[in-house]
Image (spheres, coloured by chain):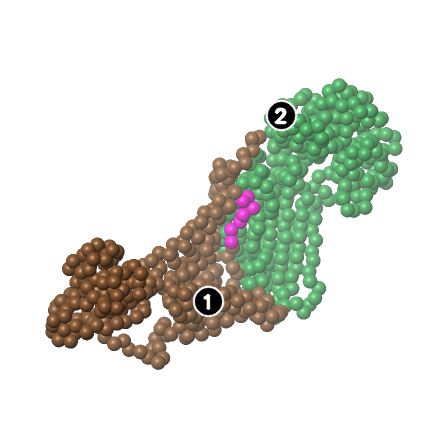
Amino acid sequence: MRPTVIQIKSFFGSNTAQSSHGTGFAVREGGVFITNYHVVAERVQYPGKYRLEYRTADGETGAVTVLAVDLRHDLALVRTSGYAPMPIKLQPSSAIKGDRAYSVGYPLDVGLTITEGISNGNVDDSFEPRIHYSGAINAGMSGGPALNAAGEVIGVNVAGYRFEQLVSFLVPIAHVQALCDRSHSQQSDIGLKKDAAAQMRAHSADLLGALDGAMQTQLVSKYALPDKIAPFINCNASGNPVTDDLVQTVQIRCLAKAGLYVQQGLYTGDLRYSHYVLSTSSLDAWRFANRLSALTAAIGSYGSPRHVGPYACEDRIVGLKGFDASLLVCVRRYRKFEDLYDFTVRVSSLNSSKQGFASHLDIYGVEFEPGMKFIRRYVEVMEWRP
Amino acid sequence: MSGERVVVEGIDGHGRVQWRERVSLHADRTAFTVGRSVHADVTLDDPHAAAMHASVEIRPDGRIFVNDLGSMNGLIVCGKRWLGARGLELPDHTLQIGRTRLRVRTAHELLEPEKPYYLRASLLVHSPAWIAAIGALVGGVQLAYASWLSAPRDLAASIVTSSWAAVSIAAIWVAVWGLLSRVMQGEWRWLRHSAIFLGVCVTFVALMGLLDMAEFVFALPPANNRYMWIGAVALAFALYLHLTHASSLRAVRAALVAFGIPVLLAAGNHWLQERYQVRNVNYIGARMRIYPPSLRLQPSETLANYFKRASGLREIASRRLIDALANDPQKDDEN
């Protein structure tokens, strides 16, 4: 098995020192390997600036070319020149919860490493399918195989939470199979980039499509506000338990955690929203309005000028169900990916001196029309129920 | 003509009289001499004056003429130097010999009527003490309101803190102008400068507050650089009033300086902001302040209208991206 797992290194320009590294394993004969997309992302997005090399456990090195990418499942199919070991067998069925598993890779450049853990089956309520692996996956092991006791691949190492205790994730093997079946022929650099862009659009369409059903709301201080609107959306709510505070604040924050890693500092196709709901029994109307004002300020979610343009905004007072609200919608366009936009939305109620809310919605890297449609649905379900 | 009295005044750079000398003239003697010598009728203490520098003649009709008595430096009349002048008229009755500026006053000159002087100013605007007091009071109320609005828990501490800051700034500002007045005009005039500072500040704060509220009441679109431009106008007014009270600048020049500086500052700032906004991809402008809902007068618009207009944002965002790329000093070659 040892020779079938290689280290894949990325270099900036003609530097001999690596810029990043990951792991890959042979899936087809003829030197065809699987690794993570994020291991080869810079090379795909900046083909003129980055190059890839492999290094085997025996110290052999050579060039690596990218054949196909799957951003959504963070996979890439690559070919090595001059190194074609026997492929590893893929497990034909999906992972079973409780099975022992072994993750293989090159963590932190310390050489080929095997860690032991337990496969915990598919992650609940995740937008992207992932296997929860209770074992160590460290930086550099990305793209390496996770094996069952029989030595068959059950998934691809993808990520671990740095400060948690061995909560790591694997990409299910079915997606590896699908990528292998899809493509063997080599694509041009431009073709790969276009393919990546098309996948980003498809992913954003899938994300907003998955949110297309009836939008569930919850009632907070007489306002019905969008709640956990899809199973994969993760919400948590908190408040100030001190009851003698003049203003009671409830915060509800929801995250889709659906973002695609495209390149360093750029994730697309994600969404988050939060509601800050204020209520008071003793504060006067002027000071209450001032408290609400402080929550309406809009600071764009951080974007780099390398990736996005400046915002264009519409800011008016609109009539919603049973109440008036100030509504700000800001849009900025992506530089390199046509038809992808970021949206920043702020809604603040203007109807009561005793209750009020400010709602913040941020959508990253989606197409314009579906984005606007979602925003409209998001504000349309808001309701005042005195 | 018998026993006409003439007063010769020495004037300083600010037009104020430094010394006065009387000369008596009569029918046989219609001229007097000016020079460094003790034999001159008016003796000057000026190294650039000749011993007998000039003679000044008063004609019966009140016109004044001057003759150079052979000086080296000549005479300066109406801003121009005359060498060996004979029978040169002084249209404004002033004359410069060496570095000394002289004004000749005769019984022919028309005096302005006596101005009334009240122990207490009749109009509020004439009384800096009143304006300063009212300004301080209103400013205190504004500070208290701002503190009250945002710090309901520890109001007193908040008022004291903001008052300290405000009083320190006011004291420094007034002290600087007072010092300038003292140097240029010989008086501290701190009451006037306090009145100007407080009056302009209080008016500016009140105006901004009202505009913020009007934006909410009438649902006006937010204006981003409003504070800056109105602030520039307020600064211009304050500078103009301070300058006219503290310096010897004439009104037109004071106005040029007072309005020129803030307009240049504001224009420069505006330009910087525009450039910054074109490049800053995270910039979203200021938003409307929220006031109690009962103040609203303008009805809200429908969501359908809102989203019809918002559909134009795609176009605007694309245009702004193109502008940003055109202005980007670091072009990305792999687009």
Label 2: few (<14), some (14–19) or many (≥20) C-alpha neighbours in 10 Å: some
Image location (x, y in percent) of residue B59: 13, 67
> In what element is the residue under mark 2?
helix
Residue A98 appears in view: yes
In the image, residue A156 above or below residue B61: above
x 51%, y 51%: residue: B285
Q: Mark 1 lies on which chain?
A: B
x 32%, y 69%: residue: B18
Residue A37 appears in view: no
Residue B266 or B143: which is nearer the viewer?
B266
Quadrant location, the C terminus of chain B: top right
Residue A84 or A285: which is nearer the viewer?
A84
Q: Mark 2 lies on which chain?
A: A
> Majority secondary structure of the magenta segment?
loop
In this image, A35 relative to B335: left or right?
Answer: right
Question: Which chain is painted in green?
Answer: A
Residue A127 or B233: which is nearer the viewer?
B233
The amino acid beneath tag 1 is Val
Image location (x, y in percent) of residue B232: 43, 57
Image location (x, y in percent) of residue B308: 48, 46
In this image, A293 relative to B259: left or right?
Answer: right
x 84%, y 29%: residue: A152
Q: Mark 2 points at which residue?
A: A189
Which of labels 2 and 1 is toward the front?
Answer: 1
Q: In which quarter of the image is residue A24?
A: top right
Q: Name the residue under label 1.
A: B174
Q: Does the magenta stretch include residue A64?
A: no
> In what element is the residue under mark 1?
helix
How far is the residue under mark 2 from the one under mark 1? 68 Å
> What residue range appears in magenta?
B280-286
Q: Tell me the shade of chain B.
A: brown
* Badge number at residue A208: none
